[in-house]
Image (tube, grey):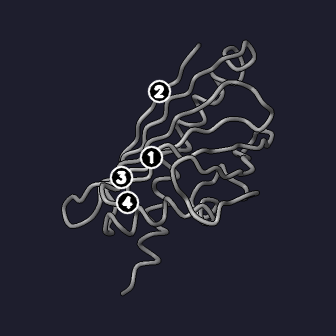
Amino acid sequence: MDEIHGRASLQVDATPQAVFDLITDVDRLPEWNIAIERVLERPPELAEGIEWTIKMHPPHTPSWTSISRVEELDRRRFRFAYETRNGDGNPSYTKWAWKITGANGGAEVTVTWDVYLKTADRRYFGGPLRKRQLAREVPNSLTAMANAVVAAAPR
């Protein structure tokens, strides 16, 4: 296995702006992504080329450090893309892309991921495990994100 590709979408009862603000708030990532244990280093502000570091700890797996670098941050079109790589220096990486559009009085959130496995250990061991994890984690995180953004909305 050299690559993993996935996509998940969810309708959220919130404005596209509210959803975009939540997913681009690095400090709030552990609030709605169960695989993220905590933020280790955060930038004062997100912008293209800026990095942040988190501790990943999906259920039932060892933890690792993940470094993300913003590739696109389009606040007008509600698009957010970044690349993540393991803090251990492995050349494997994942490209994440978020797109939020207005739909049915709320927001349609779509996230895609493209994982590129560059070493034998990732291709034969880590990749197959991570593929199964992402298939569960991403939809669960989308649901948790939707719940968080709705809970934070003014009433």
User: Label 4, on which residue?
Assistant: 75
What residue is pinned by disc 3? Answer: 109
For the residues labelled 4 and 3, say whether their Cβ atoms are less than 8 Å apart: no
Whether 69 is drawn above or below 23: the answer is above
**SS at mark 1 in the image:** strand
Labelled pair 4, 1 in contact (Cβ < 8 Å)? no
Disc 1 residue crowd, few under 14, some 14–19, many 20+, Cα 10 Å: some
Q: Are marks 2 and 4 in contact (CB under 8 Å)?
A: no
Which amino acid is tagged 4? Arg
Q: Which dot, 3 or 1, sits closer to the camera?
A: 1
Which residue is at a point 68% across and 60% down the rendered structure image? 42
- Judge left or right: residue 108 versus residue 90: left
Residue identified by numbered label 2: 5
Residue 72 circle label: 1
Q: Report the amino acid beneath label 1.
A: Glu
Residue 39 percent across, percent down from the top left: 71, 58
Residue 145 x/y as whole percent: 48, 61
